[in-house]
Image (cartoon, rainbow, N blue to C red):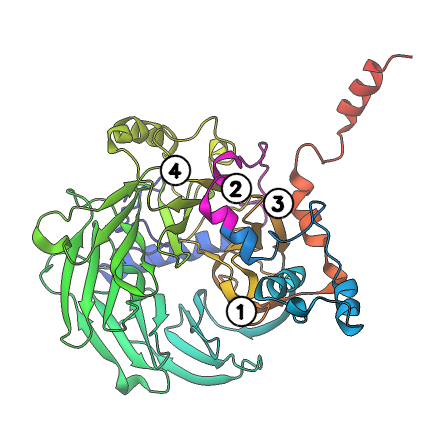
């Protein structure tokens, strides 16, 4: 993909470049990248202030949805009195004094989540590690007993996450890194992990193994294509890995036979697939692809490979003005969220696909706004405050307030058991962790601490801890601080035009308009 610098790029992910056999050419490109990276680190390139969002979240469609009611119930809000006030101290006193009814002698799961949601992460606690390169991946296994980080130095590091000590358990040099380790995922049983790089292979390793234990699965049948796998996921059964790739491809690999199949998301190969996930963590058949043209496409792996030229999707979803950077499933079989370069996060109901007859009009709206490169350029102002939704938008909720630039940022639902999925959390190009309240659409917390974009982060499944990895080369532990309660959200809303201090000229104007 071309960009305004006049350098031809091989894909729309990261700031990676198509390699060249010419050493001098590579050095020139590398120098350009390093120079621009230094510019990105300076405050004058991108303001560290939060984006100004002028409109309030539109809750009308969302409040009528199943997911709204389910999250209210699972997070303990549905059983509250109309004034939404529940006093933890009073509840404990009643239970201690035997005044609680027999069926409520102990707190229910939903009440426990309500209590837990009073103490969500709101402050950087400590710097867990300082590495030598940009951090691309930060991920817990399903139980939270292991933490994986991967960065541009070509090493995968495994840490102990079970007791919160996060001491290093294993350090493994990755193969065929070329640019960077781009993504990684734990197997369902937590015994292995897979990672991808700017190469045409999947790499599978035991968590406790070494470099010599690495198995790789090559993608065959594409001799003239330079391949990169931007996102990968283990299947719920652990026998397959799916990867989102450039040139409109999703690659499905069988780990046992080491065979691969290619799913083509578009008739023409120019559109990259930036993210992929399974719709449900117990269904190995249905996947969702997030494409660089803003579309979400759903595929059934049982019927997808009947055509070699083009894989017909089960459903498509229109709504993003620009490319999708990440997809996360709620694991209920119906709802997913997507993060996008159009500076929004959207929630989708898979039972409500878009009518592709609106695609041509939506595409023209996208072309009017997408003449920019998210890696280098400033965000178009229209993305933060669009005049109207994209034609054919079938999303049920939209969240705005974070900045998506430089890389493919991730956004995820908070853990079900701990929070009832009450929150969506994401990295931000300002170096903050942004936590949205799913039910209100507003920013609940904006955690400061990093000095560059946070590409990946993960919420511990059992503890109120978020581990974040940034391009400032640091990995931070973020948790609740009573002294910081309500401060970060006040800072997050300081850019609200209705709450900012009036400029002198506006104060004078208002004073002059005031009758004597």
Pick whichever of labels 4 and 3 is earlier in the sequence: 3
Pick whichever of labels 3 and 2 is earlier in the sequence: 3
Eye-nearest disc, 3 or 2: 2
Q: Residue at x 63, y 63 (%)?
A: 111
Q: Residue at x 52, y 34 (%)?
A: 60
Label for residue 372? 4
Q: Can residue 74 be found in the magenta stretch?
A: no
Q: Secondary structure at mark 4?
A: loop
Q: Which quadrant: the C terminus?
A: top right
Label for residue 256? none
From this view, report whether residue 211 is shown above or below residue 413: below
Pick whichever of labels 1 and 4 is earlier in the sequence: 4
Label for residue 49? 3
User: How far apart are the alpha carbons under marks 1 and 2?
Assistant: 25 Å
Magenta region, residue range: 42-69
User: How far apart are the alpha carbons under marks 1 and 4?
Assistant: 30 Å
């Amino acid at each position: 993909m071309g960009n305004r610098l006049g350098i031809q790029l091989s894909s729309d992910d990261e700031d990676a470049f198509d390699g060249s056999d010419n050493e001098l050419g590579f050095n020139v490109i590398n120098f350009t990248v390093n120079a621009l990276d230094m510019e990105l680190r300076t405050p004058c390139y991108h303001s560290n202030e939060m984006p100004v969002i002028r409109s309030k979240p539109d809750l009308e469609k969302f409040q009528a949805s199943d997911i709204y009611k389910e999250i209210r119930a699972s997070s303990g809000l549905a059983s509250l009195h109309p004034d939404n006030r529940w006093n933890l101290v009073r509840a404990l006193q009643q239970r201690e004094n035997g005044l609680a009814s027999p069926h409520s002698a102990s707190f229910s799961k939903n009440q426990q989540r309500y209590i837990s949601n009073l103490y969500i992460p709101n402050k950087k606690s400590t710097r867990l590690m300082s590495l030598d390169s940009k951090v691309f991946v930060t991920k817990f296994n399903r139980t939270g007993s292991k933490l994986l980080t991967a960065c541009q130095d070509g090493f995968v590091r495994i840490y102990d996450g079970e007791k919160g000590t996060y001491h290093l358990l294993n350090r493994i040099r990755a193969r065929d890194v070329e640019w960077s380790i781009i993504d990684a995922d734990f197997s369902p049983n937590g015994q292995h992990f897979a990672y991808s790089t700017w190469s045409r292979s999947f790499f599978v390793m035991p968590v406790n193994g070494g470099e010599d234990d690495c198995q790789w699965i090559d993608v065959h049948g594409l001799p003239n294509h330079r391949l990169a796998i931007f996102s990968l996921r283990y299947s719920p059964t652990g026998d397959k890995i799916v990867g989102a790739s450039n040139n409109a491809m999703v690659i499905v690999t069988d780990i046992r036979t080491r065979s691969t199949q290619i799913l083509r998301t578009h008739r023409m190969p120019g559109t990259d697939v930036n993210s992929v996930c399974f719709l449900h963590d117990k269904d190995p058949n249905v996947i969702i692809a997030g494409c660089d043209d803003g579309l979400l496409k759903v595929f059934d792996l049982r019927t997808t490979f009947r055509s070699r030229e083009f894989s017909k999707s089960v459903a498509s979803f229109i709504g993003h003005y620009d490319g999708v950077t990440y997809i996360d499933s709620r694991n209920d079989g119906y709802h997913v969220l997507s993060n996008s370069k159009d500076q929004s996060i959207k929630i989708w109901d898979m039972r409500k696909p878009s009518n592709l007859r609106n695609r041509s009009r939506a595409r023209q709206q996208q072309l009017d706004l997408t003449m920019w490169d998210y890696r280098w350029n400033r965000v178009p102002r229209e993305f933060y405050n669009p005049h109207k939704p994209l034609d054919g938008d079938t999303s049920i909720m939209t969240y705005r307030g974070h900045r998506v630039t430089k890389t493919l940022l991730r956004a995820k639902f908070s853990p079900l058991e701990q929070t009832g999925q009450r929150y969506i959390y994401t990295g931000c190009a300002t170096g903050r962790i942004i936590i949205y309240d799913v039910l209100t659409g507003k920013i609940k917390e904006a955690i400061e601490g990093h000095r560059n974009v946070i590409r990946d982060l993960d919420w511990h499944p059992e503890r109120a801890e978020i581990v974040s990895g940034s391009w400032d080369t640091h990995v931070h532990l973020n948790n609740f601080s009573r002294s910081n309660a309500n401060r970060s959200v006040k800072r997050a809303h300081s850019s609200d035009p209705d709450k900012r201090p009036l400029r002198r000229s506006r104060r004078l104007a208002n004073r002059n308009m005031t009758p004597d």
